[in-house]
Image (cartoon, rainbow, N blue to C red):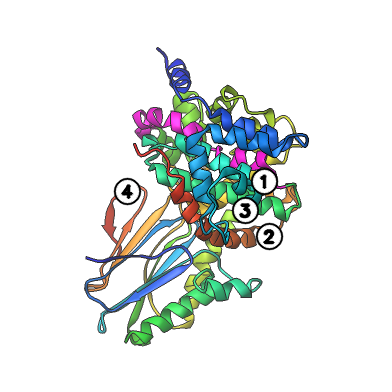
Amino acid sequence: MPQILVKLADLAVSKNPEDLLVVYGLGSTAAVILYDDGARVGGIVHFMLPNSASESRRATDYPAMYADVAIPLLVESCIGQGARRESLTARLAGGSILMGQGISRSISEGNIAAARKILAGFSIPLTTEDTGGNHNRAVRLEIATGKTFLKGPNGSWEEFR
Amino acid sequence: MNLDSAIKSSMTKLPAFPATVHRVTSLINDPDSSMTELVDVIRLDQSITANILRMCNSAYFGLRHKVDNVQDAILYLGRQNVVRAVLAAGTSRFFKNTPGYETEARELWEHAVGTALMAQILARKISRRDDASLFTAAILHDIGKIVLGEFVKDKYAEIKKIVSEQSRSFLEAEEKVLGMNHATLGGMIAASWKFPEDIRNAIAYHHRPDRLPDKTATMPWIVHLADQGCLMLGIGRGADGLAYDGMDGALGRLGLSQQDFEEALARLVREMDTARELIGIVQPAAN
C-alpha cells in the first residue's frame, strides 16, 4: 500500500483507495484527520502553531503551519477531491505538553483549542480526539476504509475511534 | 561492578574526539592564525575533508561553483561556516542507535542538528554573538544518551513507571534509577574530550539551567530552549518523548517573548528543510 508521509507543516489529501496517509512525530503539534465515508476521500494536516496573525508571509510559504490557515485548506482540498462538507467527520491528535512549562502549554493547548473551534465553525463533527500528555504520537489513515490508527506511548498502532 | 562504575567504564570506551575539530576551533578563534595552517590541519583528516567538500557543494550553502579543495571551501564558506561544517563532520561519527531511548541514529542526529540550528536562530534573536561554542554545545547536548542508552534499556520499565506514575521527568527518573542522568553524563564526556567549561556546562545543565551555579551564563538557557523547541516539533523522537521539565522564565531570562519563540519555531522548520541534505551527507554511524 503506497504510504504518503505528511511532514510537519504540510498536508495530504487522497481519493485513491490504495493510499495510506501517515504522520510521525506529533509533539506539541497536532494533526486533523478528515474523511468522507460516502465519497471515500480523506486527508490529514500536520500543523504546529495556532495562529498565523503575526506571520502572514510564512502562512503563504507553509500554508499548513498554522491551524487557522491549515484546517480550512484541508477542508477545501477534501472538497476539491470530491468530498462533501456535510459528510466530513474529523479526528484530532497531538498537543503534547512539556512538563510544567508555560510556552509549551500555551502552544499545545492553543493548537487543540484552535482545531476544535475551526472545525465547529465548519460544522464538521469531531468524532474522536487523543490529545495532551507528554509523549509523541503518530497517526495514519486508510483511504479505502477511512479507518484511522494511532500510535501512542506504548509504541503500537491501535485503531483510533 | 556497581552501576555507577559500569556507566563510567562504558564512557571511557567512547572513541576519542577528533583532534582536528579542536585544532580548527582554536585556529579560527586565533586572529593570528593563517589560512595555510587551517588548510593543513583540515587536510590531515580525510573523512572531515571529504565531508566538508560534499557539504560545501550541497544546496544548503548554495554555492555556484563546484569546490574540490579545502582552501576554496574555506574561502567560499567563510571561517564560521567552516567551524560548523568541521563540527558536523567530526561529531556525526558518535551518533549511534540508542536502545533505551528507542531512538535511531538518524533521529538522534537530526535532533542534534535541529537543536544547533534552533540555538543559532535564538542567538540571533537576542543579538548574542552567534559563535562556534554555542553550536558545539547544542550539537553535543544529548551526547550522554549514547553511553546511557544501554543502561536505560535495562531499566526501562522502572524508569517509565516513575515517569508515568509519579509524573517525574525522564531526567529525574534516570537519576533515581541509574544514579546519573544523560545531561550530567554528557558534561563528563565533554570534559574527557577537553571541551572548555562553558560548553561542558551548557551540555550538563541543558535540562536544568536553573541549577547551574553561574547565574550569568546564557548558553545553557539557549540550548535548553532550542532542545525544547525540537521536542515540541517532534524533530528527533525518542521513548522519552516530551517528558522533561520546561523552565518557567527561560524566555524572560533571555529577553524573548512568546511571539519570538513561535517565530523561531517557524524559522526552524524552513532551516531544517534546507539542512536535510546536510543531515543526510554527514551520516551517523550505521549500527
x then y, percent, for residue A88 = 34, 81
Residue annotated with mark 1: B80
Residue of label 3: A102
Residue at x-position 65% and y-position 57%: B261
Q: Label 1, label 2: how many angstroms apart (C-alpha)? A: 25 Å
Q: Are marks 3 and 1 on the same chain?
A: no
Q: Is residue B223 left or right of residue B287?
A: right
The quadrant of the image that shows the C terminus of chain A is bottom left
**CA distance for labels 2 and 3:** 14 Å
- Image disc number at residue B131: none
Q: Amino acid at mark 4?
A: Gly
Most frequent secondary structure within the magenta stretch? helix
Residue B64: x %, y % from top left:
57, 62
| Residue type pointed to by label 3 | Gly
Taking the image as shown, residue A155 lies to the left or right of residue B272, namely left
Label 3 environment density (alpha carbons within 10 Å; few <14, some 14–19, many ≥20)? some
Is circle 3 on the same chain as circle 4?
yes
State the residue in front, B146 or B283.
B283
What mark, if any, has residue A155 been given in the picture?
4
Q: Residue at x 67, y 36 (%)?
A: B36
**Disc 2: which residue:** B260
Q: Chain of mark 3?
A: A
Q: Is residue A134 visible?
A: no
In the image, which is nearer the foreground, mark 3 or mark 4? 4
